[in-house]
Amino acid sequence: MKRTQVAALLAGAALGLTGVAVAVALSRKEGREAAKRLLDKTAPYAAQARQVGERVAKSAGEQYQVLAPKAAEVFSSVREQAPAAVGAVSARLPWLQNGTTAVDTAE
């Protein structure tokens, strides 16, 4: 067996044993009560995190509503200017005209 396979087996076994230990602890009355106390302590933080997440989502939606039209305007402006830019580059680099390359013109 390769070293990575052995490491993966050991990690899986450790994770499995941890899961069994947690299951045994929670199956006992004291373990269930401890878990309930822990959840009761963290409930206000979960509610606060939920509220903050909702505010962030609302703010992101509002910013999108403001920025999306501006981005679309810039994109369409660039698209309108593209043919002129291609013409300017083609005028400076004559071997690009008519699909010929510098190698074609040297022959």
Image (tube, rainbow, N blue to C red):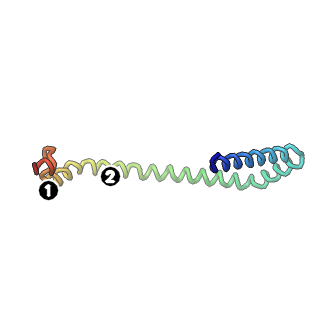
Please indicate whether residue 66 sits to the left or right of residue 104 in the image. right
Residue 86 percent coordinates (x, y): 19, 50
Residue 42 visible: yes
Q: 48 or 9, which lies in front?
A: 9
Kind of residue sitting beneath label 2: Val
Q: Nearer the viewer, residue 35 or 64?
A: 35
Asked if residue 80 lies left or right of residue 63, the reply is: left
| Residue 82 at x, y percent in the picture | 23, 49
Q: CA distance from mark 2 to mark 1?
A: 26 Å
**Sooner in the amino-acid sequence: mark 2 or mark 1:** 2
Find the residue positioned furthest to the front.
1
Percent coordinates x, y for residue 87 in the rendering:
16, 51
Name the side, left or right, on which 98 lies relative to 69: left
> x, y percentage for residue 92?
14, 56
In the shown orientation, is residue 46 left or right of residue 87? right
Residue shown at the point (62%, 55%) measured from the top left? 52
Contact between labelled residues 1 and 2, with CB atoms less than 8 Å apart:
no
| Secondary element at tag 2 | helix
What number of labels is visible? 2
Q: Which residue is mark 2?
A: 74
**Foreground of the two, 60 or 105:** 105
Query: Secondary structure under badge 1?
Result: helix
For image coordinates 58% across by 53% down, the residue present is 55
Q: Residue at x 71, y 55 (%)?
A: 45
Q: Which mark is residue 92?
A: 1
Crowding at mark 2 (Cα within 10 Å: few <14, some 14-19, many 20+)? few
Q: Amino acid at mark 1?
A: Arg
